[in-house]
Image (spheres, rainbow, N blue to C red):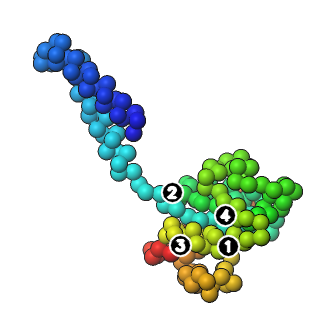
């Protein structure tokens, strides 16, 4: 948006200089100014009609076990890449012990961000003693998003009745070839 406003201002200055300094006749400066005005208007329109984020919440503490029931952040990274390639913007949630499971030390969003190569602003770690499940279910509801997990959240069904809806979940698996998401059977669904 800043670039388009800068182009607009420069084009207006060039247009003014061309008309005042050279006259209203057709000249290269006038053509360049008009081209700049058109480009800046198109850039402004494009920035206003950008597609909204298509959020999807990822249960990282579940996904990291998808390959051989062994906690691996590589599995989560592969899942993120697959989701992004399909047009989603993942928001990740982990239990507080994630770092101890994969690196024998605490890992917060910044450390996980480095390993996962994904913005820390989209990575959440539940506070110690608090399971990530209710936090990610709540965020999915607030965002109107689906949840990537193989968990069924039966223990949370009373507090969060939406978990009874199988369309809320995007299931998957992982192997040495990468992550496979079960999106082939997708049908339109209502928001969480």
Which of the marked residues, 1 or 4, is nearer the chain's N terminus?
4
Nearer to me, 39 or 14: 14
Mark 3 residue element: helix
Disc 4/disc 2 C-alpha distance (Å): 19 Å
Disc 3/disc 4 C-alpha distance (Å): 14 Å
Horizontal placement of 96 versus 124: left or right? right
Which of the marked residues, 2 or 1, is nearer the chain's N terminus?
2
**3 and 2 marks in contact (CB < 8 Å):** no
Mark 2 residue element: loop
State the residue position of label 1: 133
**3 and 4 marks in contact (CB < 8 Å):** no
Q: Residues within 10 Å of mark 3 (few under 14, many from 20)?
A: some
Position in image of residue 78 (x %, y %): 67, 56
Position in image of residue 157 (x %, y %): 62, 85
Disc 1/disc 3 C-alpha distance (Å): 12 Å
Which of the marked residues, 4 or 2, is nearer the chain's N terminus?
2
Which of the marked residues, 3 or 4, is nearer the chain's N terminus?
4
Disc 3/disc 2 C-alpha distance (Å): 19 Å
Position in image of residue 76 (x %, y %): 70, 59
The disc placed on residue 93 is 4
State the residue position of label 2: 87
The disc placed on residue 54 is none
Nearer to me, 147 or 142: 142
Q: Which mark is nearer the camera, 4 or 2?
A: 4
State the residue position of label 3: 141
Relative to residue 34, is residue 65 depicted above or below? below
Position in image of residue 44 (x %, y %): 33, 41
Which residue shows up at 77% across the image and 70% down it? 129
Q: Which mark is nearer the camera, 2 or 1?
A: 1
């Amino acid at each position: 948006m800043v670039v388009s406003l800068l182009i607009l201002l420069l084009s207006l200055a060039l247009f003014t200089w061309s008309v005042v300094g050279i006259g209203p006749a057709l000249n290269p400066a006038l053509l360049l100014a008009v081209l700049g005005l058109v480009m800046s208007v198109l850039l402004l329109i494009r920035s206003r009609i950008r597609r909204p984020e298509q959020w999807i919440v990822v249960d990282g503490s579940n996904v990291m076990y998808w390959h051989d029931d062994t906690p691996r952040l590589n599995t989560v990274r592969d899942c993120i890449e697959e989701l992004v390639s399909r047009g989603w913007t993942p928001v990740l949630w982990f239990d507080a012990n994630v770092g101890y499971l994969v690196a024998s030390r605490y890992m917060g969003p910044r450390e996980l961000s480095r390993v996962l190569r994904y913005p820390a602003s989209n990575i959440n770690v539940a506070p110690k003693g608090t399971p990530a499940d209710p936090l990610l279910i709540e965020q999915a509801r607030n965002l109107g998003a689906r949840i990537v997990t193989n968990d069924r959240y039966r223990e949370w069904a009373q507090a969060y009745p939406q978990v009874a809806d199988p369309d809320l979940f995007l299931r998957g698996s992982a192997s040495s070839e990468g992550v496979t998401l079960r999106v082939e059977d997708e049908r339109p669904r209502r928001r969480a």
